[in-house]
Image: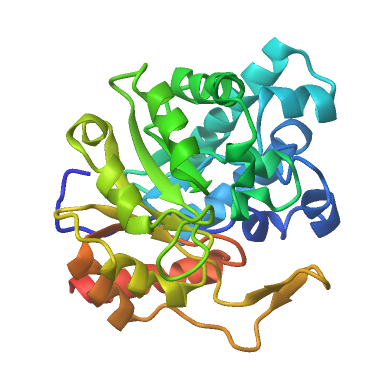
């Protein structure tokens, strides 16, 4: 990010973005949670990416949050090499959308790497408890090829997202260090106004990873998939200086686990005052996670433009 004062816009939820082109059930009820569409409906993925480009984004995310070699072998009946190539194809799809939309803006591609917990399809990314029970060598071997595929496909930035624990972040950044020229962002899932989902404080995670070694490769550190109301206290809890933050909250509603839908009756919308405050704390990249669509990303584009004018 060349301009230190600029705030950059990331896209919103892949699920929300794909819904005009794909049935809700086929995405939400599939164990690959949208990553299957790289294989089943690449054209729809291109269209969803193009919508976000039109909304004004500067970073576009591959739909590989739930993608893994193991998952593609199990649910798409592909072999190892086909699975590896399919992860790379997600980057090609982003490039196709950027080329077709031809916005005239520089748009960078972020390669999404979700936590191991997401593959368990049981909400584990929101507690991270598996990190205490699983062999770290197994986790390394599970993550390594998906990261390697994205890097081989020349993503601009690897996006480690919804990471629930310091332990898993450690493994991911050790893999990243094997590709010393690759830039990345590290984004955690947080359970309240102070703690990561697994229980460590957000402040301690920032302190640990926003260090000289990681700083060579990290362009931003932060949080995603959380209630926007938690952002200010989480940012305020950090004492580390000169941090560049990435933040992309949920749409402001509350997820109803029983009905399996969003309750938007008490929805919190990110405001220009929020952006002013977060900017002072070091916010560099903002976007949306679950339940944020193209309309919301357009709205945030306008907020950013009004902030800088």
> In this rendering, is residue 182 above or below 17?
above
The x and y percentages for residue 144 are 53, 21
Q: Note whether 129 is above or below 135 in the view shown.
A: below
Where residue 227 sits: x, y (%)? 51, 72
Q: Quadrant of residue 302?
A: bottom left
Q: How is the image coloured?
A: rainbow
| Residue at 58% in and 57% down | 13
- Asked if residue 208 can be seen in this view, the reply is yes
Taking the spot 34% from the left edge, 73% from the top edge, the residue there is: 233
Taking 35 as reference, is 63 left or right?
left
Q: Is residue 34 left or right of residue 283?
A: right
Which of 3 and 46 lies nearest the eye of the viewer?
3
Q: Quadrant of the C terminus?
A: bottom left
Please name whichever residue, 56 or 281, is drawn nearer the observer in this view of the structure.
Answer: 281
In this view, which residue lies farthest toward the front?
132
Q: How far from the left and from the top, in percent, is residue 133?
A: 64, 35
């Amino acid at each position: 990010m060349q301009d230190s004062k600029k705030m950059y816009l990331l896209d919103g939820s892949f699920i929300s973005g794909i819904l005009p082109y794909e049935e809700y059930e086929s995405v939400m009820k599939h164990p690959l949670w949208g990553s299957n569409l790289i294989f089943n409906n690449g054209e729809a993925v291109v269209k969803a990416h193009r919508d976000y480009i039109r909304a004004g984004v500067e970073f576009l995310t591959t739909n590989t949050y739930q993608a893994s070699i193991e998952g593609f072998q199990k649910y798409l009946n592909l072999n190892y090499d086909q699975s590896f190539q399919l992860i790379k194809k997600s980057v090609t799809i982003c490039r196709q959308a950027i080329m077709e939309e031809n916005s005239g803006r520089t748009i960078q591609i972020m390669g999404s790497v979700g936590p191991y917990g997401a593959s368990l399809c049981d909400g584990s990314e929101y507690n991270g408890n598996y990190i205490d029970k699983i062999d770290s060598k197994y986790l390394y071997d599970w993550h390594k090829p998906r990261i390697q595929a994205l890097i081989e496909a020349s993503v601009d930035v690897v996006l480690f997202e919804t990471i629930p624990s310091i332990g898993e972040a450690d493994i991911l950044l050790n893999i990243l260090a094997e590709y010393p020229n690759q830039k990345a962002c590290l984004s955690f899932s947080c359970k309240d106004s102070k703690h990561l989902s697994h229980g460590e404080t957000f402040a301690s995670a920032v302190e640990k990873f926003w260090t000289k070694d990681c700083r060579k490769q990290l362009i931003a550190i932060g949080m995603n998939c959380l209630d926007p109301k938690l952002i200010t206290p989480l940012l305020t809890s950090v004492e580390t200086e000169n941090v560049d933050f990435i933040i992309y909250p949920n749409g402001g509603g509350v997820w109803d686990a029983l009905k399996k839908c969003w309750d938007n009756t008490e929805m919190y919308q990110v405001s220009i005052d929020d952006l002013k405050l977060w900017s002072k704390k070091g916010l560099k990249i903002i976007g949306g996670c679950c339940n944020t669509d193209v309309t919301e990303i357009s709205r945030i584009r306008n907020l950013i433009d009004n902030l800088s004018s």
